[in-house]
Amino acid sequence: MANPKRRHSKARTKKRRAHDALPKVGLSVCPNCHEKKLPHRVCPHCGQYKGREIVTPPEI
């Protein structure tokens, strides 16, 4: 097996890892309560999806 002759510098390693960051999550706005939520999912704040109440909203 081949072994590296010298170790990679910190700058070279960080340049390679610069593209490994996770992308930001795309959020949409709930048309009922105007809170941010994940798209195509029930709103965790009001419990509605596409204008219908799917789950009862949590009591805060």
Image (cartoon, rainbow, N blue to C red):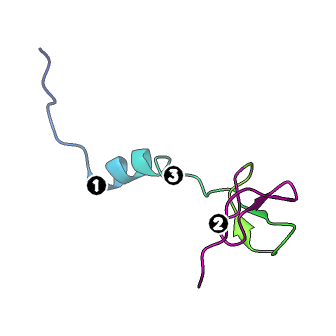
- The magenta region covers 41-60
The spot of residue 42 in percent (x, y) is: 70, 56
Instruction: Check the picture and name the quadrant holding the N terminus.
Output: top left
Location of residue 22 in the rendering, given as x and y in whole percent from the top left corner: 51, 52
Query: What residue do we see at 60% from left, 81% from top?
Result: 59
Tell me how far mark 1 sits from mark 3, CA to CA: 21 Å
Amino acid bearing label 2: Pro
Camera-nearest residue between 32 and 2: 32
Is 49 inside the magenta-drawn segment?
Answer: yes
Query: Which SS class for mark 2?
Result: loop
**Above or below for 33 versus 14:** below
User: For residue 50, which quarter of the picture?
Assistant: bottom right
Q: Which residue type carries mark 3?
A: Leu
**Few, some or many C-alpha atoms within 10 Å of disc 2 (few <14, some 14-19, many ≥20)?**
some
Location of mark 2 (residue) = 44
Which corner quadrant of the image does residue 34 belong to?
Answer: bottom right
The residue that label 3 is drawn on is: 22
Mark 1 vs mark 3, foreground winner is 3
**Which amino acid type is marked by label 1?**
Lys
The residue carrying mark 1 is 10
Q: Is residue 24 left or right of residue 22?
A: right
Residue 55 colored in magenta in the image? yes
User: Are dots 2 and 3 in contact, CB under 8 Å?
Assistant: no
| Point 14% across, 18% down: residue | 2
